[in-house]
Amino acid sequence: MRTGRLLSLGLVVVFLMPAVASAQQQATTNYQSFVIEDFDNPAESPWMVVGSRFIAEDYPRMSYVRTFPQALYRREPEGRELRVLGVQAAFNRQGYNFVEFIPVEEDDDGEMVPRGIPIPGRVRNFDMWVWGSNFDYYMDIHVQDYRGMTHVLNLGNINHRGWRNLRISIPTWIPQTTRYVAEIRSGEFTSDLRSLELRKIVLWTRPEERVNGFFVYLDEIKVETDMYREPFDGEDLRNPDFVQELWAEGEGM
């Protein structure tokens, strides 16, 4: 009798599995690629670099250098001035030293303060181009979710020569949506989306590697992201301007 029940349960699971798989395959997505930073316009999108405790005097040095990875462009496109973010650094002692690459903006007092770079959609993958000179270093990225929590993700080692594309998948446990119906703000129709922000990129040295002087270059930070928005009946009722107009018309009736 028990064997018969188990057999029946097994048949139910077998029949349900194709239906579940089919539903998953039919989930609507709209994956698109966006370059969120190319370093070609320093005045419009400024960055700064900061070294850790044992940074050598007069370092780090930063420059927007007129070059590019040939894997991206065989030659510079006409009418564009391609640049990369170049950093020269050195430390006074070996260890887990770091250099931070931070996007910034000017505040009301004229001071440069950190800013986040919004990532559109529900980001799936993150990648960037890094020029290395075969030092045994590695890089992290810091992304912030809508709750203000920062997540540190390892982008990979840069112990290679020349340009290489580093790529990482964004873990599914980092929240990018909310179950509540969101409002439209500044004319943007966001549904339940809660976008991530890129806060900074960090280069780390390893204790056994020398640190008396090195160069690193960054270019074209890109994301692959799902831009699909699930429509629903009555979504205009989350637009605060529309709701205010409706309530003004209906007040006192």
Image: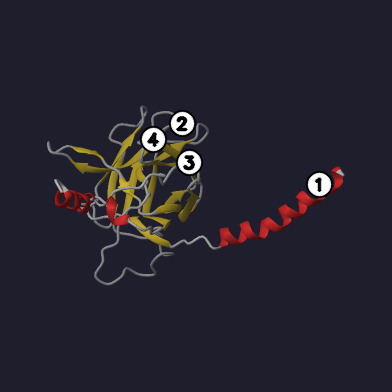
The residue labelled by disc 4 is 149
Amino acid type of the residue that numbered disc 1 sits on in the rendered structure: Arg
**Few, some or many residues within 10 Å of mark 1 (<14, 14–19, 20+):** few
Residue reaching furthest to the bottom:
78
Query: Residue 153: percent from the left, percent from the top?
Result: 47, 41
Label annotation for residue 96: 2
User: Closer to the N terminus: mark 3 or mark 1?
Assistant: 1
User: Closer to the N terminus: mark 2 or mark 3?
Assistant: 2
- The alpha-carbon separation of the residues under discs 2 and 3 comes to 9 Å
Query: Residue 160: percent from the left, percent from the top?
Result: 50, 50
Question: Which SS class for mark 1?
Answer: helix
Q: How is the image coloured?
A: secondary structure
Query: Residue 220: percent from the left, percent from the top?
Result: 37, 56
- Which label lies toward us, 3 or 4? 4
The residue labelled by disc 3 is 137
Amino acid type of the residue that numbered disc 2 sits on in the rendered structure: Tyr
Q: Residue at the location (41% across, 60% down)?
A: 228
